[in-house]
Amino acid sequence: MDILTHTLSGIAVGTVISGFSRNGFKSKFEVIVFSAIGGALPDIDAISLWSGFDKTFGKLFRLNHPGKDIYVSKFWYSHHGFFHSLLASLILAFVIGLLFYAIQRRTTNYSLWDSLKANGFILTGFILGFIIHLLEDMPTP
């Protein structure tokens, strides 16, 4: 599937999840946006197909393989590697939760747990958007 289909699937999941929220429009919109990001993010590894990848990222990270080889190989950072796993969705959602906590800590007295609970719909939307991407990729190469 293509990135647009995955993003739209994330939006659909986010729309369902935001329906359970009793918060206002802005909060529901944030859930939908993060669900869309979750739906698109597993394909971030496809950047290795970008024509300038070898001259920029390849050189910066001193990669021994050209981008097209990385994409089709079985490295942990190749397409359908780490970013196409449930573990990646949980780790990335936790990192996003930590970022929310760092931002909210400046204006509120939230603990980390309180911050994660307050952003629960957003993080759930992100994880489920990510998972719907993985499910959509199962029947397609």
Image (cartoon, helix red, strand yellow):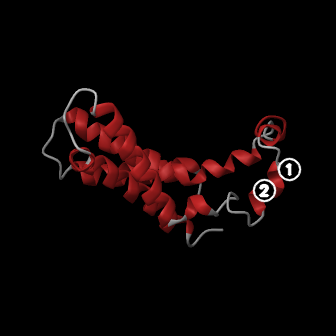
Residue at 57%, 62% (x, y): give it: 84
Query: Could you tell whether 57 is left or right of 82 in the image?
Result: right
Q: Which residue is mark 2?
A: 70
Q: Secondary structure at mark 1?
A: loop
Residue at 53%, 65% (x, y): give it: 85
Quadrant of image for the N terminus = bottom right
Q: x, y percentage for residue 138?
A: 55, 71
Q: x, y percentage for residue 98?
A: 37, 44
Q: x, y percentage for residue 79?
A: 67, 59
Q: Seen from this angle, which residue lies furthest top?
A: 107
Query: Could you tell whether 14 is left or right of 3 in the image?
Result: left
Please, is residue 127 above or below residue 118 in the view? below
Q: Which residue is mark 1?
A: 66
Q: Secondary structure at mark 2?
A: helix
- Within 10 Å of disc 2 (Cα), the crowding (few <14, some 14-19, many 20+) is many
Q: CA distance from mark 1 to mark 2?
A: 6 Å
Query: Could you tell whether 15 is left or right of 4 in the image?
Result: left
Residues 138 and 104: in front is: 104
Quadrant of image for the C terminus = bottom right
* Numbered label attached to residue 110: none
Under mark 1, the amino acid is: Pro
In the rendered structure, are the residues bearing label 1 and label 2 in contact, judged by CB atoms less than 8 Å apart? yes
Residues 13 and 90: in front is: 90
